[in-house]
Amino acid sequence: MEDYLLLKAALVTEGIRSDPASVAEVGTRYKEQNHGLFGWDFENHVEQKLPDDFSLPDGTVVQYRKNSHSQYHVVPEDGRLQLYHNDRSVCEVQWLRRPRYYEKKTTKGNDMIKVGQIGGKDCLFFCYQNYCSHFAKNQQCAFCNLVSTSNVYDSVMRKKDPVDVGEVVKAAWAEGDVNHVNLTGGCITPQREVAIVSEILASIREHTGFDTVPGTLLPSPAKGDTIHQYYETGIGSLCFAMEVWDKKYYEAICPGKAAGTSHDEFVSSIKQAVGVFGEGNVYAIFVMGLEPKETFLTGVKAISELGANVIPFVWSPNPGSKLFGHRAPFAEWYAQTNREAAEIVHDHAVPAGTRNHCYLCDGNSLLHDALREKGVV
């Protein structure tokens, strides 16, 4: 039987390529990449529409990361899409359905697809401002290509109107597949960001009737009073992009962010947020593969002890980032480390928080899939 967790790890660390015939209906029948925030591919593909993500036979969702030299490739066979590793047939895969709202416009005349995009199967994603102030001083996180991606593809609106966002949420939810929203933006001043988020959440609640909006908010590091202010917007959970647990690695890899928010400030803020949002409704985001296994797992344990969850993204050394041309650890490292992380989270009985985030959202993370092996969905 195929180890689908290990297979997913291989597909996101080695990338994938596809026979042209297999992607012929991407952008019409199947959901295409729209680069709402980062580019996760190993190479740019401005003129080519590629799948955003796809599913494996057990329901695992995998992010599509183009690599023309990958040993993994997809070909159409007898009306199906077959994944191969070199000459070995691995399994059938399925591109994900393209949402109907991708063809619609807001009342202000903006293309809905340029406002918000579906990530995975059920997560509606908005980057409310495709900008990060750290790039201006060359102090951006070494793995980040936010500005480069925005310039290369220019496929989404860089600033989102709150009314447009509310209309897109309403349209997407009406199709019956979306279960969560995910809101984020580049690093901007805290009070300005609180004001932007408050307007957007007010619009979402007005258009949907939600009291508490199921989903996650990942702002610039929330501290002090802003944590409660974000809670008052009506979002279901709050995220903290710690990126790296080890203090020295964090300072080296994230110089701009570290200058404004220390490791210890992150920890104390997460603890405070759990007290406001409740256990399981706070997340620490890590870019996994940038630090040793031991320090990463130390971080998972420390975050779990606070009653918060962890979302560790699998690092992709993508174009436009300072680490482009490097490579991530091998698939076996990711699979084993995530399974050990799942043991830690499970042992600490952290509530799964699946109303706000789930394995169907996560084509670029493995921890949800490892927890699913343990019966946590």
Image (cartoon, rainbow, N blue to C red):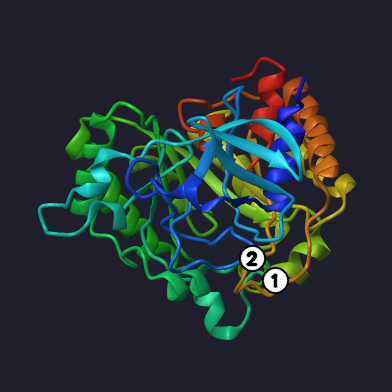
**The label number, if any, that marks residue 318 in the structure image:** 2
Q: Is residue 70 above or below residue 209?
A: below
In the image, what residue occupies the spot 82% across and 53% down? 329
Q: Position of residue 213 (x, y in %)?
A: 34, 34
Lateral position of residue 372 relative to residue 172, left or right: right
Q: Residues within 10 Å of mark 2 (few under 14, many from 20)?
A: many
Is 329 located above or below residue 375 in the figure? below
Mark with earlier residue (1, 2): 2
Residue sitting at x 28%, y 32%: 173
* Quarter of the figure with the N terminus: top right
Give the quarter of the figure containing the C terminus.
top right
Does residue 363 appear in the picture of this structure? no
Residue 250 location, x and y as percent? 75, 63
Q: Is residue 2 left or right of residue 226?
A: right
- Residue 102 higher or lower than 254, as above or below: above
Question: Element under label 1?
Answer: loop
| For residue 243, above or below residue 3 | below
Q: Quadrant of residue 29?
A: top left
Residue 221 placement (x, y as % from top left): 55, 57
Q: Is residue 291 left or right of residue 352?
A: right
Measure how far apart labels 1 and 2 are at the Cα level: 5 Å
Q: Please name the residue shown 47% across and 55% down the image.
A: 219
Query: In the rendering, which numbered label is found on residue 324?
Result: 1
Q: What residue is at 45 percent from the left and 69 percent from the top?
A: 46
